[in-house]
Amino acid sequence: MIPSRLLVIGAGRMAEAIVSGLKSTNEPFFSAITIANRSDRQRLDKLASTYKVEITRNWKESMSSFDVVLLAAPPDAHDNLFSELSSCMNGQLVITVAAGIDPSTMEAHLPAGTPVCWMMPNTAALVGKSMTTFACGKNVIQSHRHVIEQILSAVGEYEELSEDQVHDLTAITGSAPAFLYLYSEALEEAAVNYGVTSEQAQRLVTKMIAGSASMLETGTSAETLRNQVTTPGGSTAAGVEVLEKHNMKNILKEAVKATNQHARGK
Ligand SMILES: NC(=O)c1ccc[n+]([C@@H]2O[C@H](COP(=O)([O-])OP(=O)(O)OC[C@H]3O[C@@H](n4cnc5c(N)ncnc54)[C@H](OP(=O)(O)O)[C@@H]3O)[C@@H](O)[C@H]2O)c1
């Protein structure tokens, strides 16, 4: 295996999730990991001591010592980062995890021929359970894919999609966790109304959701599982009927649509 040296620009929660995942494997793939940010020195020192990584402020001067650049800075920092990178890079694979910064955008701003990849992890990356979608640019070859998969698997599961699909499906993998948390809040509030503490309510709802997710992971469809729980004419059916009367499926589809319209600036 050819040693790969990784530069991570941005040292926030997502950078930490990825570095933590990469460092937790028995056989680390990257021979060296270096992290950079603009201003927060204490943050860099903390990451260096926790994960035994290198830190730098002057990544432009040492660009030739990196094979892969991972951008984990906010989307609006990318224009500047692309011009800084363009002035010093020489063929590195460039990956971003920033919302909205797709491979076409990256290719338009980086030197011709640059291999690029756009990854959209979700918040569960922080616990190694992201469902990440990703799309590659036209200069990505097999050896780059190997590197890309190492990074993706550091934070959970992944699925390769077209650039347009990553834009549209971010509403499902990236935003829908917020929809699920809202659903949890509602059930917790309902549970508290029956006299349990909020801690008890949170445990009941969390374990119910985790158990249901495990059932879905067996591969049985959501519809089959729903029917198994819902005896016709029974009490669960009475509850489902209320959700259907208020067209819950449609509400969720509308929420996905609104998310995508906003993301695309419509
Ligand atoms: N957190 C998530 O669940 C999640 C999910 C999917 C995608 N993402 C994406 O991941 C990226 C980072 O998110 P985050 O949650 O990790 O944010 P965060 O915790 O706020 O961290 C952002 C980091 O970027 C650094 N930074 C900002 N501007 C910079 C620049 N011009 N050059 C170098 N470093 C810069 C900041 O440090 P300084 O200010 O010191 O430079 C900070 O270390 C974003 O693009 C976001 O869209 C996050």
Image: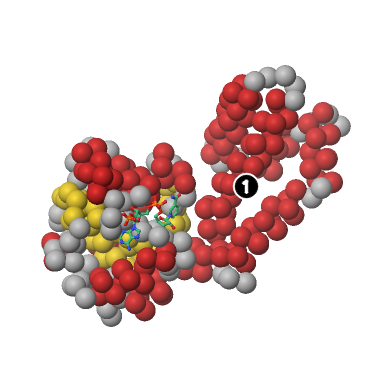
| Location of residue 258 in the rendering, given as x and y in whole percent from the top left corner | 65, 61
Query: Going 65% across and 62% down the picture, which residue do you hit?
Result: 257
| Location of residue 220 in the rendering, given as x and y in whole percent from the top left corner | 60, 40
Query: Mark 1 is on which residue type?
Result: Phe
Q: Nearer the viewer, residue 39 or 103?
A: 39
Q: Nearer the viewer, residue 119 or 220?
A: 119
Question: Is 106 left or right of 175, judged from the image as shown?
Answer: left
Q: Is residue 172 visible?
A: yes
Which of the 4 image quadrants contains residue 168?
A: bottom right
Query: Going 42% across and 66% down the picture, which residue do you hit?
Result: 76
In this view, 208 is above or below 113: above
Disc 1, SS: helix
Q: Nearer the viewer, residue 2 or 50?
A: 50
Q: Is residue 154 visible?
A: no
Please name the residue that numbered disc 1 is placed on.
179
| Location of residue 165 in the rendering, given as x and y in whole percent from the top left corner | 52, 65
Query: Going 62% across and 67% down the picture, which residue do you hit?
Result: 261
Ligand 1 closer than 8 Å to the CB at disc 1? Answer: no
| Location of residue 68 in the rendering, given as x and y in whole percent from the top left corner | 23, 61
Q: Dot 1, how many residues are within 10 Å of its Cα: few (below 14), some (14-19), or many (20+)? A: some
Quarter holding the C terminus?
A: bottom right
- Quadrant for ligand 1 reads bottom left
| Residue at the right extreme of this rendering | 233
